[in-house]
Image (cartoon, rainbow, N blue to C red):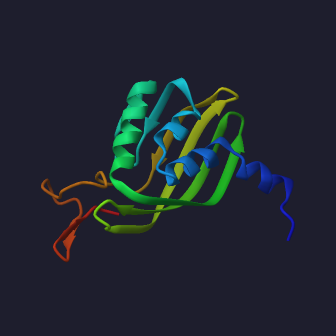
Amino acid sequence: MAETEHERAIGESPLDKFLRALDQLDAEAAMALMTPGCRLLTVDGRRAEGTEAVRALLTSYLATLHSSSHRVTAEWHQGDAWIAEVEASYELVDRLQLNDLPRAFVARGGPDGLSDVRVYGAHEDPLEHDGETGDRGMRIGGRWMPSL
């Protein structure tokens, strides 16, 4: 089946390119898509504003991963905003796998790049959480599993 014009436009969205950079574990490629005054909100509530702070947060996040995969299941674009429903799968550096986690990405930007990227999901601890605080999550097979 031939790709429609709409499907081509979606595949080339700035958000799609951002997700591809994350899946390549390439913070610099992701940063190349961002504006100087960019902002980032991660699914676990961490925030960064400005190029260096966003770069540091992305670098820290990607350092916890051995691999990453984001599959867009639906995407919308209106004005300067892109919204995507995503299934995210991660393999941490210790080879623990977290698969098919539901995510919602909201990105804003223009021809100069993305100025704001926000990631939403169930309330979660950072992927590298050690399970030392509170009851958010559980231990399975001796390993801490963040709340999903």
Question: Residue at horizontal 64%, vertical 43%?
Answer: 82
124, 8: nearer the viewer: 8
Residue that protrudes farthest toward the bottom in the picture: 141
Q: How many marks?
A: 0
Judge whether 3 appears above or below 30 on screen.
Answer: below
Question: Residue at horizontal 83%, vertical 62%?
Answer: 3
Q: Residue 124, percent across and down?
A: 32, 54
Q: Residue 51, percent across and down?
A: 46, 26
Can residue 57 be seen here? Answer: yes
Choose top left, top right, bottom left or bottom right for residue 49.
Answer: top left
Question: Residue at horizontal 78%, vertical 56%?
Answer: 7
Viewed as shown, does residue 105 lie left or right of 78? left
59, 143: nearer the viewer: 59
Viewed as shown, does residue 8 lie left or right of 102? right
Q: Residue 5, percent across and down?
A: 85, 53
Viewed as shown, does residue 31 lie left or right of 82? left
The quadrant of the picture occupied by the N terminus is bottom right
The quadrant of the picture occupied by the C terminus is bottom left
115, 54: nearer the viewer: 54
Question: Residue at horizontal 30%, vertical 51%?
Answer: 126
32, 57: nearer the viewer: 32
Viewed as shown, does residue 91 lie left or right of 6? left
Q: Residue 16, percent across and down?
A: 63, 49
Judge whether 76 appears above or below 80 on screen.
Answer: below
Judge whether 5 appears above or below 112 on screen.
Answer: below
Choose top left, top right, bottom left or bottom right for residue 40.
Answer: top left
Choose top left, top right, bottom left or bottom right for residue 42.
Answer: top left
